[in-house]
Image (cartoon, rainbow, N blue to C red):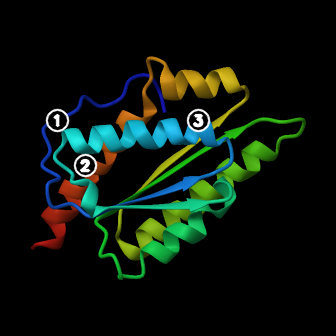
């Protein structure tokens, strides 16, 4: 994501059923991201009672959990996936970022349920902090993307 994100619009999520799948790895950062997403969704009128939160051990497991949430039990209109993958001594973070991104995109297309890829992949912890707690506020951006995709899905599913 670049710094030139879309301007927020006025969305009504008062009846939106949204799922959040969040990793427990780098939990303090991910918890902060969950909080920022939840606050932004609430600002659009999304009630906490219609929010489903599931946790996974790490970001690599997020696509499987997202797939489980698409099985129709919850009748979700959108899923937001949240994780933080920081470079270690190898390039494993790129593998996790790319494979989860492809899996989530394929799942979203197959199920026609928007899945917002909120897995942040960085080289340093400082970069992750800037994206979550700094001026970028990716949590708000992920929630805004979810709201816009819910509206788009409603528009085309109701025809």
Say what secondary structure mark 3 lies in. helix
In the image, residue 120 above or below residue 65: above
Q: Which mark is residue 82?
A: none
Image coords of residue 32 (percent x, y): 50, 35
Image coords of residue 116 (percent x, y): 42, 52
Is disc 3 in contact with disc 2, using a CB cutoff of under 8 Å? no
Upstream in the sequence, badge 1 or badge 2? 1
In the image, residue 97 above or below residue 5: below
- Report which residue position mark 2 lands on: 147
User: Residues under labels 1 and 2: Cα distance?
Assistant: 9 Å
Say what secondary structure mark 1 lies in. loop
Is disc 1 in contact with disc 2, using a CB cutoff of under 8 Å? yes
- Which residue appears at 36% of the width and 29% of the height? 5
Task: Report which quarter residue 142 is drawn in.
Answer: top left
Task: Report which quarter residue 39 is drawn in.
Answer: top left
- Report which residue position mark 1 lands on: 9
User: Residues under labels 3 and 1: Cα distance?
Assistant: 27 Å
Image coords of residue 63 (percent x, y): 58, 65
């Amino acid at each position: 994501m670049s710094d030139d994100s879309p301007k927020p619009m006025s969305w009504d999520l008062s009846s939106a059923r949204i799922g959040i799948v969040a990793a427990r790895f780098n939990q303090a950062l991910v918890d902060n991201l969950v909080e920022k997403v939840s606050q932004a969704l609430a600002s659009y009128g999304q009630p906490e009672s219609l929010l489903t939160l599931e946790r996974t051990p790490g970001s690599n497991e997020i696509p499987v959990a997202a797939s489980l949430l698409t099985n129709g039990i919850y009748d979700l209109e959108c899923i937001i996936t949240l994780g933080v993958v920081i470079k270690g001594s190898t390039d494993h973070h790129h593998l996790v970022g790319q494979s989860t991104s492809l899996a989530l995109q394929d799942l979203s297309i197959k199920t026609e349920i928007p899945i917002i890829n909120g897995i942040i992949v960085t080289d340093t912890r400082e970069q992750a902090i800037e994206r979550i707690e700094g001026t970028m506020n990716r949590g708000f951006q992920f929630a805004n993307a979810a709201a816009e995709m819910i509206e788009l899905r409603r528009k085309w599913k109701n025809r």
